[in-house]
Image: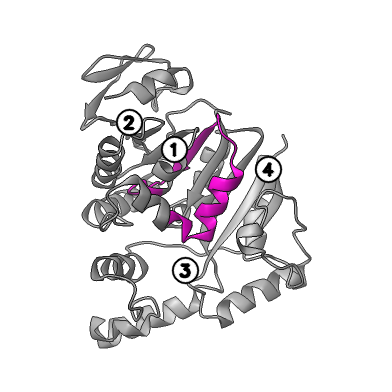
Amino acid sequence: MINHMLKNIDIFVCPKCKGNLKTTVREIECQKCHSKYEIKNGIPLFYYEEQENLPQKAVTSKMKAFYEKTPFPNYENTDDVPGLIQKAQRSIFAYLLNQLIPYNIRVLEVGCGTGQLANYLGIAHRSAFGADMCFNSLKLAQQFRDRNEIERTGFYQMNLFNPIFKEESFSFVICNGVLHHTGDPYGGFRSIAKLVKKDGYVIVGLYNKYGRITTDIRRLLFSFFGDRIKALDPRIRKNDINEIRKLTWFLDQYKNPHESKHTIDEVLGWFDQTGFEFVNSIPKISIFNKFNGKDEDLFEINSSGNLFERIMCQLILMLSGGGEEGGFFVMIGKRIK
């Protein structure tokens, strides 16, 4: 049940003391502090929270309870590998990751939710890791993995502020839609950035401060007039999305207990402070630089633009109503230090 962990045991550490681990069929033990971790439904439970940072802990606890109740995204009727591949390839982002991330490397998705991307990337010859704090989401991910025998993907319960991996263990670390639901987004970024190898890549997706304005207005209207007007959200009006997906989207966008918003310049500052150089973004920063769809090279170095271009990029995102993803933007950095 934990063959994936055993094959990669060299990169695992205790989240409490960073000691090496040893495993048995039922539990995992730290060889340094002797903490023991349960294995449930084939998922190692490494979730650990330090006691001191109370504001961060309060946010984490609220978010954990929310996503345990509402796993996101849902697998719907995608219950086999061909179905997952077909669904993933409708997403340009997932398609490009699969096309551009090399084989025979380790890839980590932090905040993997129900693990659809991690399972998709693990179908090819990569060692994929999905980490999340919510057991119910991981259980869905693990069930799909086991049912379809995706042996190169493994799922682990983890607090991103207390990683279970050694520093510089991964060529790619993906963290989409996660940090803005924490009490310390930059602290969370620093934590996961340490896991990236030199010349490796971090991919981080966040809500944009300007692109999120339309969603905030809709949220305010819902609070006044109730959920009966939720068709104001363009995704809810789509006919090609089933009711389960619409509900999970609505809850995630409008009923989430905590979110923060961020700017391009803020994330560029994160990159500078942690030894990363800017590589690319979605949407593109320069209004003169076109995103090439499925022909885009996500890992080709682009200009981070000037202040005017960065402001214009975010204003366009705001004027478009936040786009399909509700004001979401993605930044890619390469570790150079």
- Residue topped by disc 3: 325
* Labels 1 and 2: the sequence-earlier one: 2
Q: Three-letter amino acid code at disc 3? A: Glu
Comparing marks 1 and 2, which lies closer to the viewer? 1
- Left or right: 111, with 222 as reference point: right
Comparing marks 1 and 4, which lies closer to the viewer? 1
Q: Three-letter amino acid code at disc 4? A: Lys
Q: Residue at x 44, y 55 (%)?
A: 88
Q: Is residue 182 visible?
A: no
- Residue topped by disc 1: 122
Q: Which residues are magenta?
A: 88-116
Image coordinates for residue 109, horizontal then vertical, percent: 46, 42
Q: Quick check: is 94 in the magenta stretch?
A: yes
* Labels 1 and 4: the sequence-earlier one: 1
Q: Secondary structure at mark 2?
A: loop
Q: Which mark is residue 46?
A: 2
Image coordinates for residue 97, horizontal then vertical, percent: 55, 48
Q: Quick check: is 191 in the magenta stretch?
A: no
Specify few, some or many for label 1: CA neighbours under 10 Å numbering under 14, 14-19, or 20 or more.
Answer: many
